[in-house]
Image (tube, grey):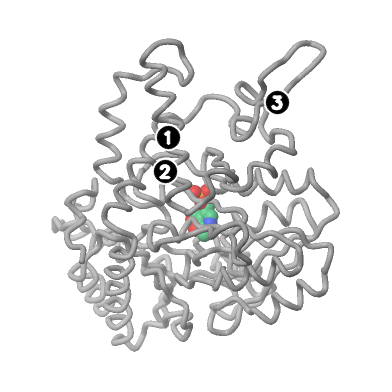
């Protein structure tokens, strides 16, 4: 069982001053937005700054830099259970860029195809498809889960036209984890592929893409390093090398080609073909180090510990009548996030009260999952627009816990809400 991981986290224990002048220890419950930084990741970067050179540069430092940069791809594949002989890892700025890239490649494949996405998604897994394709959006149930009947209906309705389902591996609002393997199997029966947005999953639970010959294989995966405790840019798009070798770069520039003359362009093989411009040497280095740390602690240990945190927070909030939590009847909450509102108090006021009066940082708003938050709060699209125009947009308060948060921090937070 893990304990006291906060000593490995930069900024987890810093003092902050509240409005009445009290100095208190900061509590950070906004890990779904970005996690705080792991010290080993920062140390690793700092130690290597004096050795900075370009990757592929001639000489021993160039060789060292290139090897450490490339080796992280293998660590990532291992981390998500990818197939080293079939999958490739493309480094991108973040998951948003990864999903835009994938959407663009599917567009190159067939602009007329239908993409299915869901009403649970962060907008990063919705807008890149809405803007390019005819899309079908799977509804969520009243408990906040993916409506599997609706998914099957949509697959049936758009049979032979659907080539991709884009779905989250874990909601960034409620911590619900849709049954992605069951869904993958269903999607494959319809001849389509599945993209799992694992941005809120891989730092909390062990995740596996499963073998290619398994019906439950996950075809494409994205995640972001800054949500895995690096504090830097860096994200990945993982999927079949053969798929990526068919298309043209989304961003053009240095590295994407292996030969150019005024008469001819030959593109690099993937992943380089999709990595235009300056490589994110330190972001990648930090990602490798952070994933190593998570593996050493053990994802199962992290999941077990975070479950305790979640239940403690949930019990605390349940004991306060003016708190309304969302989606708590779901049986699929596996990530320690809770979305709630407080009767009669606007969500930004609650969040500001927590931060200014108690030094407790939480998320407030739609957390980028606009459709999902509207559905959870029971606000129709028309009402949502009217509220937005009035300057009272729909939203929730979200606590998103991480492996280094503690029960006593949760007690402080619950007391603060009780005294609101
Ligand atoms: C579920 C989910 N997907 C995608 C993203 C986008 O991640 P990034 O901002 O790192 O591109 C987020 C960000 O919060 C998210 O929560």
What percent of the width, then of the height, locates residue 119?
A: 63, 69
Which structural element holds mark 3?
A: strand
* Image position of 155 with respect to 87: above or below: below
Assess whether mark 2 and mark 1 are in contact (beta carbons under 8 angstroms): yes
Relative horizontal placement of residue 416, taking residue 88 as reference (left or right): left
- Tell me the crowding category of disc 3: few under 14, some 14 to 19, or many 20 or more residues within 10 angstroms, Cα based: some
Relative horizontal placement of residue 101, taking residue 247 as reference (left or right): left
- Choose top left, top right, bottom left or bottom right for residue 250: top right
* Image position of 201 with respect to 379: above or below: above
Residue at coordinates 48% horizontally, 55% vertically from top-left? 199
Which structural element holds mark 2?
A: helix
Residue holding disc 2: 75
- Tell me the crowding category of disc 2: few under 14, some 14 to 19, or many 20 or more residues within 10 angstroms, Cα based: some
User: Which disc, if any, is residue 125?
Assistant: none
User: In the rendered structure, which disc, 1 or 3, sits on the residue that comes first in sequence?
Assistant: 1
Residue holding disc 1: 71
Relative horizontal placement of residue 108, taking residue 144 as reference (left or right): right
- Tell me the crowding category of disc 1: few under 14, some 14 to 19, or many 20 or more residues within 10 angstroms, Cα based: some
What percent of the width, then of the height, locates residue 83?
A: 54, 49
Residue at coordinates 73% horizontally, 61% vertically from top-left? 192
Which structural element holds mark 1?
A: helix
Between label 1 and label 3, give the one nearer the viewer: 1
* Image position of 351 with respect to 245: above or below: below
Residue holding disc 3: 267
What percent of the width, then of the height, locates residue 43?
A: 25, 35
Which quadrant of the figure contains the C terminus? Answer: bottom left
């Amino acid at each position: 069982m893990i304990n006291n991981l906060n000593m490995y986290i930069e900024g987890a224990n810093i003092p902050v001053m509240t409005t009445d002048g009290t100095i208190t220890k900061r509590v950070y419950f906004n890990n779904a937005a970005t996690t705080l930084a792991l010290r080993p990741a920062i140390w690793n970067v700092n130690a290597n700054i004096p050795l900075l050179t370009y990757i592929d540069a001639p000489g021993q430092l160039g060789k060292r830099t290139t090897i450490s940069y490339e080796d992280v791809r293998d660590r990532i594949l291992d981390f998500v259970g990818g197939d080293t002989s079939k999958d490739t890892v493309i480094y991108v700025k973040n998951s948003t860029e990864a999903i835009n890239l994938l959407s663009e490649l599917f567009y190159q494949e067939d602009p007329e195809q239908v993409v299915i996405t869901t009403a649970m998604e962060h907008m990063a897994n919705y807008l890149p498809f809405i803007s390019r394709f005819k899309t079908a959006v799977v509804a969520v149930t009243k408990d906040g889960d993916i409506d599997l009947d609706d998914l099957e209906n949509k697959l049936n309705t758009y049979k032979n036209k659907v080539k991709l389902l884009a779905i989250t591996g874990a909601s960034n609002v409620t911590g619900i984890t849709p049954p992605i393997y069951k869904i993958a199997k269903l999607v494959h029966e319809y001849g389509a592929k599945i993209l799992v947005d694992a941005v809120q999953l891989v730092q909390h639970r062990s995740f596996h893409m499963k073998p290619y010959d398994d019906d439950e294989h996950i075809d494409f995966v994205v995640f972001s390093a800054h949500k895995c405790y690096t504090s830097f840019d860096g994200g990945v798009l993982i999927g079949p090398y053969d798929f990526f070798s068919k298309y043209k770069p989304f961003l053009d520039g240095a590295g994407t080609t292996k030969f150019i003359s005024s008469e001819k362009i030959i593109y690099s093989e993937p992943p380089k073909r999709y990595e235009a411009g300056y490589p994110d040497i330190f972001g990648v280095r930090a990602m490798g180090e952070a994933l190593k740390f998570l593996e050493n602690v053990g994802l199962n240990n992290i999941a077990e510990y975070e479950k305790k945190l979640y239940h403690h927070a949930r019990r605390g909030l349940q004991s306060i009548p003016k708190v309304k939590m969302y989606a708590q009847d779901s049986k699929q909450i596996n990530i320690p996030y809770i979305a709630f509102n407080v009767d009669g108090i606007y969500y930004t006021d609650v969040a500001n009260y927590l931060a200014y009066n108690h030094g407790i940082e939480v998320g407030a708003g739609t957390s980028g999952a606009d459709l999902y938050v509207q559905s959870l709060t029971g606000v129709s699209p028309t009402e949502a627009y009217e509220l937005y125009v009035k300057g009272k947009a729909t939203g929730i308060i979200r606590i998103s816990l991480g492996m280094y948060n503690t029960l006593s921090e949760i007690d402080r937070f619950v007391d603060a809400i009780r005294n609101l």
